[in-house]
């Protein structure tokens, strides 16, 4: 079995600058603790294999020192994932704020790393609670995103009068994941999904 340090090295070679949290999301899942990755990354740094530098957004990114990259791990055009330019979580929140406001909803949004409900919208006596996830860089990461956002939404369900929705990028993989969720589960929970495209279009699927 490949060790965690080797997994981290292989991932960071392909996607330089990933944070410990982003590495954890890709390797272990969105809900997994990041301490093991943090410890392994610091160990690689102490060996001169990784450097940990502050990115433009203020977060610490991991970068492989070029001289330490084995040729077998060097990415080529076929191994690099080019789907990293998709919608981020905050970008989706901004699109939904505009979309909801146009329909008369008052919107409260938790941006960035703020805790709490991602989007809590009210319109008169109506309430709409929406949990949001961004694109993710890898297919497996998107599966984890979907499962995690579903669990987060279920944990929010303490208001019997509220509407509850997931909000995800309008990607085929997310649509298939939603389609595979049993109809009985959708009927029992009454959870719907909002698919948001790069153009700002929003599709509400129940």
Image (spheres, helix red, strand yellow):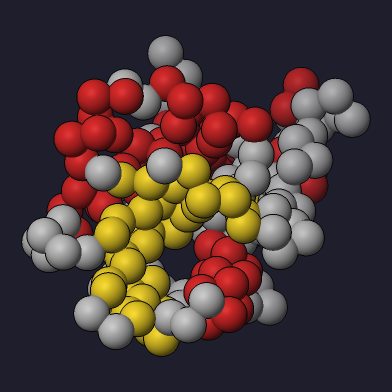
Q: Picture coordinates of residue 178 (x, y %)?
A: 45, 32
Give the residue drawn at x 53%, y 82%: 101
Please say if 55 is above or below 108: above
Between 124 and 151, the one lying in front of the other is 124
Residue 171 in the image: above or below residue 84? above
Image quarter of the C terminus? top left
Query: Residue at left 54%, top 63%?
Result: 89
Does residue 178 appear left or right of residue 68 in this picture? left
- Location of residue 73 by image quarter: top right
| In this view, 91 is above or below 25 | below
Residue 22 x/y as whole percent: 50, 52
Say whether residue 90 is visible. no
Using the image as rendered, state which of residue 126 and residue 91 is in the foreground: 126
Residue 127 as seen in the image, left or right of residue 84: left
Q: Is residue 99 visible?
A: yes
- Figure quadrant of residue 186: top left
User: Could you tell me which residue is drawn at 37 percent across and 59 percent down?
Assistant: 131
Report the residue that reaches farthest toward the top: 1
Q: Where is residue 94 in the image (x, y as percent from the top left)?
A: 58, 75
Residue drawn 38% across the image and 72% down it: 119
Q: In which quarter of the image is the N terminus?
A: top left
Residue 127: x %, y % from top left: 27, 72
Give the answer, above or below, for where 160 lies relative to 186.
below
Name, please, the residue furthest toward the right.
77
Number of numbered discs overlaid on the protein picture: 0
State left or right for residue 56 relative to residue 28.
Answer: right
15 or 159: nearer the viewer: 159
């Amino acid at each position: 079995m490949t060790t965690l340090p080797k997994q981290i090295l292989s991932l960071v070679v392909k996607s330089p600058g990933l944070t410990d949290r982003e590495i954890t999301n890709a390797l272990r899942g969105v809900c997994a603790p990041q301490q093991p990755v943090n410890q392994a990354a610091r160990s690689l740094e102490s060996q001169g294999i990784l450097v940990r530098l502050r990115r433009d957004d203020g977060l610490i990114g991991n970068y492989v020192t070029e001289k330490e990259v084995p040729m077998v791990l060097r990415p080529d055009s076929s191994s690099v994932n080019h789907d990293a330019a998709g919608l981020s979580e905050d970008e989706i929140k901004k699109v939904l704020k505009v979309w909801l406001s146009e329909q008369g909803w008052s919107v409260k949004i938790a941006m960035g790393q703020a805790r709490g409900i991602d989007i809590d919208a009210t319109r008169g006596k109506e309430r709409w609670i929406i949990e949001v996830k961004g694109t993710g860089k890898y297919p497996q990461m998107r599966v984890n995103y979907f499962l995690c956002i579903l669990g987060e939404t279920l944990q929010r369900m303490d208001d019997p009068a509220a509407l509850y929705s997931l909000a995800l990028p309008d990607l085929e993989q997310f649509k298939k994941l939603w389609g595979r969720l049993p109809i009985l589960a959708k009927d029992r929970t009454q959870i719907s999904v909002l698919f948001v495209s790069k153009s700002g279009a929003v599709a509400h699927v129940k």
